[in-house]
Image (tube, grey):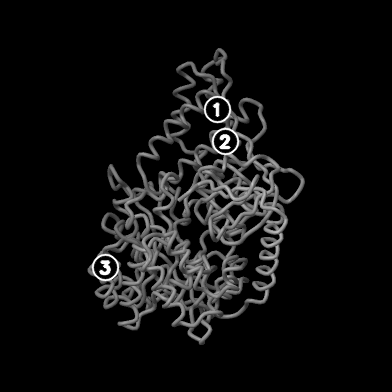
Amino acid sequence: MAQTEPLTPGTFRLTGVPAAPGAAVGPVARMAPPPRLPDTRPAAGDPDAEAAAAREALDLVARRLDEQAAGLEGDAAAVLGAQALMARDPELARQVGERARAGEPAAWAVHAACGAYQELLLAAGGYLAERAADLADIRDRALAVLLDLPMPGLPDPGVPHVLVAEDLAPADTVRLDPSRVLAIVTRQGGPTSHTVILARGLGIPAVVGCATAGSLQEGVEVAVDGDAGTVVAEPGAEESERIRGRAERRQALLASSTGPGRTADGEPVQLLLNIGEGDPGAAAVHDSEGVGLMRTEFLFLDRAQPPTVAEQTSAYTRLFTAFQGRTVTVRTLDAGSDKPLAFVDTGSEDNPALGVRGYRTAREQPGLLTDQLRAIAAAARETDARVRVMAPMVSTPDEAAGFAELARAAGLEEVGVMVEVPAAALLADHLMRRVDFVSIGTNDLAQYTMATDRTLGTLPDLLDPWQPALLSLVGTVGAAGLHHGRPVGVCGEAAADPLLALVLVGLGATSLSMAAPALPAVRHALARHTRDECARLAGLALAAPGAVAARKAVREAADPEIVRL
């Protein structure tokens, strides 16, 4: 894939990874570089005083992140809350203290300790590696405090703009104002990064993994296409007007897109929300048919002891009540050695992404799962929501049967599993005989199918959900669901792409779960295509040799109105 392509004199096109749908035109505003240590290191003061100053800076960073999180909901609140906890990590504080007491000034101690900790997280892979970028942001904010420099943050050129950055930290992404930030372009990052998830939640078009984004100069007008993954520099009046008109059409069409998901010939496709920590009432006001993925980790992480059944029941009841009369699909605890729990010792693992996580945690601590199922069942009895439960990281039909037995014994009637590893997809026919439904987690399924760590910004193309190998596995699961009459959901980020949503339905998906801002576009795309047309588009994607060709083939064959959105 060419990264930079000349078009006309003074005009050129950059390519990256399509990350968040939509298009916009505006001037470039670049993120300032992060604070850096002075070239000359000063003499350290009293070691204890330096250690105290470093810890106070980290604590101040944590408090400010908590303050930001308090005014947010959903993924944004959860991401910032987790980052604040990382700033307070006792192990990080210990490493900073050791370096300060060894004679390093406070700022140098923070910089070195964070760097060492980052290397450990990257080496661990999986969820922990995803947190390395968050730690870099904590380091930069603490340095700004210690060196009395401007806090890292977003540029404010005074006009609506296209934000261009090396990458975006979660604390910056959640502060984006969609009325000011027209689009995002980053040099690093992949299609499942925190930046992308949060940008989609805000409805901001984004292109990531654009290796030549550094060539975009401050103030230069660019046209960003988050569906095609392109950035055109100095596009000219005609192209700029075309993109602006497209954005206006999208806004008008999506404002009129309401109600249940349906194809053009009336086939129902449930449109659901992905939710986690936050205000369930605020989530419930969106025009959705319920919840396709309720994350429960926020109740368990960063605690010395697991939450009691009563604590869990109270939290679940509050959420189920907000979605009275609608579907709520609860994912049981998705944690383990890649999302460490203080009360679960899984031992040392060289590759946590392939270790004890998700449903496998029950092998070590079965009581965690049985208590959670009891709490979910108790909360379900108190409300009129249609509560379903599913287990993450299930690999075999025997695991599916074991989970179903536990869930039904707790009093839960609708039981499913997540399909996140190729083994589960390949044996979907056997899986369907053990459970009532399945939900495909495309983020992890892409990672395991392509043997590519989802945290690597250097290989974003391999994690593209348009990869035909990934879509082939989705089709295998969809065919099994059709054969057994079982619902097949998709709750990964792929479901938020309107064009890809058509392909997923063509492959057999009966429900799609996503962030709220993506619902109208997906609903509108489905309403313009029949079920048979979705199947035809799916065939084109499967026949393509790669992700770029698959996307291109579907764009050319889909309803032009959808492509123009």
Nearer to us in this view, 526 or 439: 526
Of circles 3 and 2, the one toward us is: 3
Kindly report the distance in space between the C-alpha atoms of the residues bearing marks 1 and 2. Answer: 9 Å
In this figure, which residue is indicated by the disc labeled 2?
A: 59
| Residue contact at pointers 1 and 2, CB within 8 angstroms | no
In this figure, which residue is indicated by the disc labeled 1?
A: 54
- Find residue 253 and report its horizontal and vertical position in percent: 66, 73
Q: Which mark is residue 310?
A: none
- Find residue 351 and report its horizontal and vertical position in percent: 30, 45
Query: Pointer 1: residues within 10 angstroms few (<14), some, or many (20+)?
Result: many
Decide which of tag 3 and tag 2 comes sooner along the chain: 2
Which residue is the extreme one toward the left? 398
In this figure, which residue is indicated by the disc labeled 3?
A: 426
- Find residue 290 and report its horizontal and vertical position in percent: 52, 74
Specify the amino acid type for callout 3: Leu
Please determine whether, in this image, residue 67 is positioned above or below residue 241: above
Please determine whether, in this image, residue 78 is positioned above or below residue 384: above
Specify the amino acid type for callout 1: Ala
Which residue is the extreme one toward the front? 9
Q: Quadrant of the C terminus?
A: bottom right
Q: Secondary structure at mark 2?
A: helix
Decide which of tag 1 and tag 2 comes sooner along the chain: 1
Q: Quadrant of residue 230?
A: bottom right
